[in-house]
Image (cartoon, helix red, strand yellow):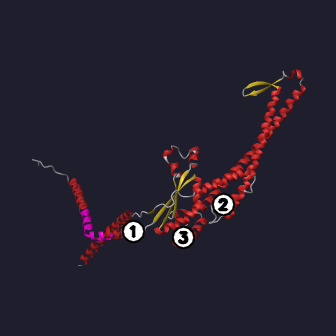
Amino acid sequence: MRSAQTTVPSSQAAVMNVQEKSYFENEINLMDYFRVLWKWKNFILLGSVLPALIVGLILRSWSGKYRQTYVYGNLNMNDKDYEVFLNRFYCADNIDGLVTKLKENGQNEYAEQIEKVRGRKVLKGFIAFEVSQPYAELIRSKKVGITVTDPAKLGEIVQLKAPLLSMTIIARAKQDIPIIASVVRDNLENLIPVYLVEEELNAAATEWRASMAGIEENRFDLELVLKMNRSTLAKLKDIKAGSSDKNESTITLQFDVGSTGEYLPLGYQIQAAESKIVQLEERIRADEEKYNYYKDLLTLNGKLSAELRNRASPHYTIQQFHSFLADVSGSCKKELKGYLNSYIKKIENKISASAPVTENPEVYVVPKGTAKKTAIVLAILFMISTFAAFLFEGSQKSYVRASSKLC
């Protein structure tokens, strides 16, 4: 009689034995790892926790940095103005002027640090600027509801004005902040506006040249139309002269208005032609006056630009340029006095807008990120010490095996 017990094929039993053996081996290997970690726990702790604590204490006791932020209002800079401003402030000549002033005020270390680094990105660690409206982020923002590929809307965004400019000064010593701030503020409030004014003068000159080109382009068409109207008037007068007084009132001429034809007496036609000629002559005369006015403006613009170019230095201020404008105003043409007086008012507005909202803002400690940096150091050292523990354990086992073979 066959046994009730089910017999397992030898091949299946062999597979089961291999799986069980692999499971137990994996379990044994995992336990071996824990045993190694436990055996070398003191080494791992001393090699990771202790150095991380030391690094944390050093960072905490290490002298941090201090920052002071000045906010300027009513500047109304668009994207282009802001980029010009940054390029001018971080340019080599302006940095040289800052370095010289800092050395004159006893800030040799700070001046040398700025002189060494050079370059806008690195200098942001010493003097940083920010506008209240980040243009690049605004263009990418979904709140705007447009895409960058829309040229019309993109042009509107580029022209958006940022009303506030923040300047942050960063230094290692708190007592150095007021001295550094006075030097940088003097540069920002008195010298940088000169560079911006120069850029505005160049933009105005370009606009005036474009207007003059438009007048010259339209001049030929206007003179041609004027010539045609004079010829028409002469012919109408010939018709009138050839007609008798008796029949004059019965003579009418046809002219087209859109798709319809209308008739007017000859006398009215002559009056209309004469009125048109007067309008064209006045238009040409007005364009000629505009052309000469723009020409005079370009001459004045060249004089102002030459003053900025010839006097350009880290010491030429917007106040000095204002004084120069007052002298020019007394000797300029009568036609330009209105423009120049208006321009002087704009410069005065720039001077008043260059003052910060708060004269003495608070000085804050720059966060050092001690906890974050300590945690990173701890994680790195823990991995290194754990790896070293397994290396030491493997070396010991290899040494024991070699010794047993020799015995």
Residue 321 tag number: 2
Q: Which residues are magenta?
A: 28-47
Q: Name the one closer to the observer, 131 or 7.
A: 131
Q: CA distance from mark 1 to mark 3?
A: 25 Å
Q: Position of residue 274 (x, y in %)?
A: 81, 33
Residue 330 tag number: none
Instruction: Tell me if residue 274 is in the magenta stretch.
Output: no
Residue of label 3? 111
Residue of label 1? 59
Q: Name the one closer to the observer, 382 or 109.
A: 109
Judge whether residue 74 can be spotted in this image. Answer: yes
- Circle 3 residues within 10 Å: few <14, some 14–19, many ≥20: many
Q: What residue occupies the far front of the structure in this picture?
A: 330
Vertical arrangement, residue 115 with respect to residue 266, above or below: below
- Circle 2 residues within 10 Å: few <14, some 14–19, many ≥20: some
Name the kind of residue labelled 3 in the image.
Answer: Ala
The answer to which quarter of the image holds residue 266 is top right
* Residue at (80, 38) in percent of width and height: 226
Name the kind of residue labelled 1 in the image.
Answer: Leu
Compared across the picture, whether 386 is left or right of 77 comes to left
Q: CA distance from mark 3 to mark 2?
A: 28 Å
Judge whether residue 172 can be spotted in this image. Answer: no
* Residue at (64, 65) in percent of width and height: 313
Where, quadrant-wise, is the C terminus in this rendering? bottom left
Q: Position of residue 38 (x, y in %)?
A: 25, 67
Number of the front mark, 1 or 3? 3
Label 3: which secondary element: helix
